[in-house]
Amino acid sequence: MTPTPFVAAVVLPMFNEADNVLPVFERLAAVQAVGMFGLRAIAVDDGSRDATWERIQQAAQPFVRAVRHPINRGMAAAIRTGISTALAERNPVVDAIACMDSDLTHAPEDLPTLLAPIANGRADFVLGSRYVRGGGMVGVPWERRAISIGGNAVGRLLLGVPAADLTSGFRAARSDVYRAVELTEPGFGIQLEGTVKAHRAGFRVAEVPITLGVRRHGYSKMAYTRAFWLSYGRLFVGLMLSRGRHPSTLRRPVV
């Protein structure tokens, strides 16, 4: 009997990313062509005001599923739409769901490394980590580095999740994780929320090294505004208050 191939969906939230659509699809197609696993790309246009939707339709390949928000609802909403779309896939059923930035600050070529611990049955939830041996950042401004490093250190201390990169946006999980864990955070904190909830639910969390780069086209949607800090503060307090005794099954790093 021929074994059932491992199938992964990668969620690509897009907002005004017209110049990145073709490059990210081409690089994902190259990853798929290697044939290590079945790949489905879920491109979510989050109400872009440029030609993102048109480029998605023009450049779409057979492995790409396109979804559109008529208005901009934010990155977290785009991620939830992508995850729910992946969970609804039936031909074939998706075994794992990855999320990555569509601006190529995350390298599509790292997807096999990210997904390997799940495909091999060694982990349920995998973080592409900047802060384990072999990981790093290239060209990222020092202030963003400092905020990320400091925020992760505080998160480990206050939230009790022994992962080096709690907030990494490059991540993957078994589909069952997203059936069990509800993501409700409206902003960039959805990354932290997902990591903490997966760990507290007893899922095996692992980290693999990745290098975060900088975008070549377009502009970053992350801004350290008052609303950003208030949202993160509220999330931290909520997660701290809900902290209890949870099984610790972290395995890191898995390289």
Image (cartoon, grey):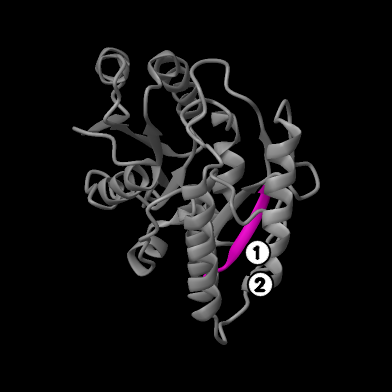
Q: Main secondary structure of the magenta part?
A: strand
What residue lies at 38% left-to-right and 16% top-to-bottom? 18
Where is 215 relative to 126, above or below? Answer: above
Over which residues does the magenta segment extend?
203-208
Q: Which mark is residue 158?
A: 2
- Residue at 28% x, 53% y is 87
Image-quadrant location for residue 224: top right
Q: Residue at x 68, y 38 (%)?
A: 144
Report which residue position mark 1 lands on. 155
- x, y (%) of residue 237? 53, 71
Residue 97 image position (x, y, % from top left): 41, 49
Q: Residue 107's spot in the image, x, y percent?
A: 58, 30
Q: Residue furthest bottom?
A: 245
Q: Is residue 233 above or below residue 222?
A: below
Disc 1 element: helix
Q: Where residue 207 sits in the image (x, y, percent)?
A: 66, 54
Secondary element at image label 2: helix
Are circles 1 and 2 on residues that touch, CB within 8 Å? yes
Horizontal side of 192 relative to 76 (left or right) equals right
Judge left or right: residue 201 versus residue 95.
Answer: right
Q: Is residue 40 visible?
A: yes
Query: Residue at the spot x=57%, y=87% of the render?
Result: 245
Q: Quadrant of residue 164?
A: bottom right
Q: Find out whether residue 207 is within the magenta segment.
A: yes
Disc 1/disc 2 C-alpha distance (Å): 5 Å
